[in-house]
Image (cartoon, helix red, strand yellow):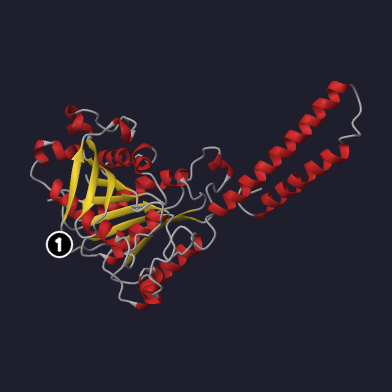
């Protein structure tokens, strides 16, 4: 029986109803010594609680598609699937913003990892991770981020070279620490570079929830926070002014809401971004209790933030996208939505896909996809000069 789908929910529903009913009917009919009757009653009560908890867990998993199979739930691999290749483009940028680089503090709670340097002496071999505050001159917004500079940044042979920049975005509400401690972006990049599957890049890891708790969907809200401007213009300019990173040919990558945001800022700002990866992303506008009205009541503005609508009604932008998804991700934000977007894509937009047979909307699935996503993204970024 599959982990996702109606059969498991039906079975657990029957058990969740049946076990309390059986407990009620058998309660006064149990025979035997007192200790046996007490133990049996306690066991029936416990079984009723367990079946109820399992039913709730199954319903939540069906809603969020966190785990796509029993193997994944138990820690199995979800790395099936292959990338369908395409190509990319890039152009120019202007703007003003600032970034304050600070030493990592204990308050950031970054867990030291084997692939990340903890002292300046290790920067040439393991790269440098810094806690930063990025303040946007255009948007007026500020947000914490982690910036990782690759080992090559500190090596003599690369001393006068600039590097492609990559914005790495969490889902909603998100925590930028998860990009370092859980998804291990710096280590994955280093592994792919060492294997000859990627080029060195500067990672800017942050959450798109710039004005918590509101989910702005990376939108410039009328008379509200200009989050699209912050992510698409302020962040690249701030990092460019602070470190040796190229002003154009940037990349973006994110999961879930971060995937939507990555695709969105690349498509709407092809003068800055040449490529983006959406890990289990979606491609239409959302409105719920976490977003509120992001468009000031304007249907036109809502449509302009709908990536599928843009492909249907506007000239496609000259960027490259990689969309990853599992066939087991159902619902309006899952596999069907990705297929719809793929069907709408046309040149000069080039869309690649990485579709896996099994996997949920969770870290386990994205862990299996991330190495290939990093390699793909590296191949579609601006060159290091």
Residue 239 vertical placement versus 108 (above, below): below
- What residue sits 31% from the left and 60% below the top? 225
- The answer to which image quadrant residue 182 occupies is top left
Q: Is residue 126 left or right of residue 50?
A: left
Closer to us: 360 or 307:
307
**Residue 289: x and y, percent?**
49, 59
Residue labelled with disc 1: 94
- What residue sits 66% from the left and 46% below the top? 55
- Please say whether residue 238 is visible from this viewpoint: yes
Q: Is residue 277 left or right of residue 128?
A: right
**Residue 141: x and y, percent?**
26, 54
Closer to us: 158 or 145:
145
Q: Residues within 10 Å of mark 1 (few under 14, many from 20)?
A: few
> How many numbered dots are placed on residues in this image?
1
Residue closest to the far bottom: 313
- The answer to which image quadrant residue 136 occupies is bottom left
- Please say whether residue 198 is visible from this viewpoint: no
**Residue 93: x and y, percent?**
16, 62
Closer to us: 97 or 198:
97
Q: Label 1: state its secondary structure.
A: loop
**Residue 295: x and y, percent?**
38, 69
- What residue sits 30% from the left and 76% below the top? 315
């Amino acid at each position: 029986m599959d982990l996702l789908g109606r059969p498991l929910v039906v079975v657990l529903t029957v058990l969740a109803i049946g076990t309390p009913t059986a407990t009620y009917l058998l309660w006064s009919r149990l025979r035997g010594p007192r200790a046996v009757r007490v133990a049996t009653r306690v066991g029936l009560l416990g079984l009723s609680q367990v079946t109820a908890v399992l039913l709730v867990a199954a319903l939540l998993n069906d809603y969020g598609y966190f785990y796509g199979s029993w193997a994944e739930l138990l820690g199995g691999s979800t790395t099936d699937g292959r990338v369908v290749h395409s190509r990319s483009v890039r152009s120019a940028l202007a703007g003003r913003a600032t970034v304050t680089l600070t030493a990592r503090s204990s308050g950031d709670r970054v867990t030291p990892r084997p692939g990340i340097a903890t002292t300046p002496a290790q920067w040439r071999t393991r790269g440098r991770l810094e806690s930063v505050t990025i303040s946007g001159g255009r948007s007026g917004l500020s947000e914490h981020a982690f910036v990782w500079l690759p080992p090559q940044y500190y090596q003599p042979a690369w001393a006068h070279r600039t590097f492609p920049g990559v914005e790495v975005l969490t889902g909603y509400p998100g925590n930028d620490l998860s990009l370092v401690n859980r998804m291990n972006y710096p280590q994955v990049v280093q592994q792919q570079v060492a294997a000859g599957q990627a080029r060195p890049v500067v990672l800017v890891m942050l959450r798109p929830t710039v004005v918590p708790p509101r989910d702005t969907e990376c939108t410039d809200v009328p008379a509200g926070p200009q989050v699209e401007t912050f992510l698409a213009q302020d962040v690249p300019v701030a990092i460019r002014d602070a470190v040796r990173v190229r002003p154009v040919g940037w990349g973006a990558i994110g999961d879930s809401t971060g995937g939507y945001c990555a695709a969105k800022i690349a498509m709407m700002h092809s003068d800055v971004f040449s490529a983006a990866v959406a890990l289990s992303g979606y491609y239409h506008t959302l409105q719920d209790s976490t977003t509120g009205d992001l468009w000031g009541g304007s249907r036109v503005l809502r449509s302009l933030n709908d990536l599928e609508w843009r492909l249907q009604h506007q000239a496609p932008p000259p960027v490259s996208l990689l969309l990853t998804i599992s066939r087991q991700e159902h619902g309006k934000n899952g596999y069907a939505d990705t297929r719809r977007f793929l069907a709408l894509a046309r040149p000069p937009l080039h869309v690649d896909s990485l579709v896996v047979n099994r996997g949920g909307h969770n870290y386990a699935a994205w862990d299996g996809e991330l190495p290939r996503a990093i390699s793909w993204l590296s191949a579609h970024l601006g060159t290091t000069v």
